[in-house]
Amino acid sequence: MTDNPQPLNDRWFYALVAAGVFLNATGLFPPILEPDGALYACIAKTMAQTGDFVDLYAVGHDWLDKPHFPFWVSALSYLVFGINTFAYKFPALLFFLGSVLYTYKFVRLSYAKLTAQVAVLVLLTAFHGVLSNSDVRAEPYLILLIIGPVYHFYRVFLGTSRSWLHLVLGSFLTGCALMTKGLFVLVPIGGGLVIHWLLTGNWREFLKPRWYLAVVLSFVFTLPEIYCLYQQFDLHPEKVVFGNTNVSGIRFFFWDSQFGRFFNTGPIKGAGDKFFFVHTLLWAFLPWSLPLYLGVGKTITALVKRQNPWPTQSLQTGSIQTGSLQTGSTGTSSEYVSLGSGLATFLLFSLSGFQLPHYLNIVFPFYAIMTAQFLVDLSPVNLRRWTNAQTVIGVLLAVLIVAVLVVVQPAHLGLALSWTMLIGFSTFAFFRKNTMLSLMGRMVGAMLLLAGILNLFLYPTFMQYQAGLAAARFVNEQPQLKKRPTVLYGSETFGESSWSYEFYVQTPTQYIHENSIAVLEQMSRRQPVQVFTTNTYADSLEAHGFQVRRVAIFPYFHISQLTYDFLNYNTRSTTLKPYVLADVRR
């Protein structure tokens, strides 16, 4: 174990940060992925086009599922950059990069510079974090809106200057987090602080009025969301939502959207698996999942033994003693916020009845910190071993990427293989030693290879099978088709490719449900109607007596759920489902 670990060379650290920023920015290039990303992009598009920032609409109907904040940000971005892929993804990337800065600042409150540097590079390269900057949902926003309040509230706890400002800023960001995901964000924001107080004996914090003021202020900053929900739903009990009337938007926000999913009693249900996130983190936090698990294990073991697990990394922030867990001191030799927030959220989602892989992205800053704590505390011998072990993981990722390229046969295959060789050789040329710098450099290189291949070569190939996107581009390029509105015809939930069509097409769209076929019948008696639907629904229209002239056919695959048969160039055609753009008349 080293004393006073030396930070990374600033020049190399900033170079690696720049590379990390670039690999996340490659997510700006692929079109918006279906289904959720395209749906959210359409909701924000409607908001920007109508100027209605109060009501949320999807598929032409009132929409009650997620709160408003990400849609407000996206709609404002549309007003600045126009309605396009970049405008939808760019604000999310900025929020994510803001979370990286907050992570650095938070670590520096308790640990040495090297720990902060390593945590930043881990956060920039964690696989699912990079992926979420391509498939943008709420998570890039939430990462900042959770680590930000934790940083400000921890500053209040430490009693630093301008505590009142940090209290207000922390409460404001918490309010924005509530308006992004709902009440459960209070677990990663407040849970870590509470656990830290318990473990360090700061019981009196529970009696201090400032924390209750923070709770009140957080909900005050949430009032815009409450107002919007009241205006759209509570004032209109006649609206049909989730198949029911008398639906309260405020109740949904405070109960059904969170506790309803947790207990699986709300209108949106899932199938929970208590070990889902145990194995999900193994790939989602690549290439850092193993040091993360070991870091958590070491921290918990040290807590059981009443020891400080990371004495060599701690700053002198008040009353410092190393070697045992300190109590009753504002300046403690270690922070347990990261462990508390990370584990509390992990357990909460593991016990939930509704689980998705991207849920844990919101606490990746805390996982990055725990990973950094473990790596920085390694002895020189163990660091050499871990550098070699992580390098093996990086090499395996490179081999996997090459194998996928050979199977997929993307456009510009030669360029993709050249990218692979360039990144691989450059990485090992610059980072040959078994040092912390080499460890971080090799992993940045491995993820730059992975993200670069995914976002620059594979996703552009896959996106041609996102039928709505392909059809929208086709319509936009045909002057005669571009003049006409399009009916999106299908099942009640629509989804699949209708949302990407709605977002990318430059003409008005209208959704017509199969049970409302009479509306289409009335419209098509006057003149042919331009319809985008599946080939199966086109056949059903013919069976109902409509004249259907197929203008173009577009192959479709659900890209967010890749299979080997789809990836394989030789078997891909067997997995595709046709969508059609057709002229329909009665």
Image (cartoon, helix red, strand yellow):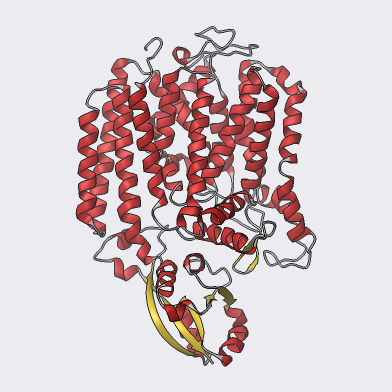
Residue 581 visible, this orientation: no
Residue 116 place in picture, x, y as percent: 45, 24
* Occupied quadrant, residue 351: top right
Residue 68 place in picture, x, y as percent: 64, 52
Residue 41 place in picture, x, y as percent: 53, 58
From the viewer's perspective, tell me whether residue 194 is left or right of residue 297. Answer: right
Residue 388 place in picture, x, y as percent: 26, 27
Q: Nearer the viewer, residue 209 or 163?
A: 163
* Occupied quadrant, residue 3: top left
Q: Nearer the viewer, residue 448 or 556?
A: 448
* Occupied quadrant, residue 352: top right
Residue sticking out furthest to the front: 80
Is residue 325 shown above or below 538? above
Tell me which residue sits at (65%, 51%) in the image. 67
Give the quarter of the figure containing the N terminus: top left
Residue 467 visible, this orientation: yes
Give the quarter of the figure containing the C terminus: bottom right
Tell me which residue sits at (44%, 69%) in the image. 468
For the image, the number of numbered tags is: 0
Is residue 342 shown above or below 374? below
Is residue 110 shown above or below 132? above
From the viewer's perspective, tell me whether residue 380 is left or right of residue 320. Answer: left
Tell me which residue sits at (47%, 65%) in the image. 504
Q: Nearer the viewer, residue 330 or 279?
A: 330
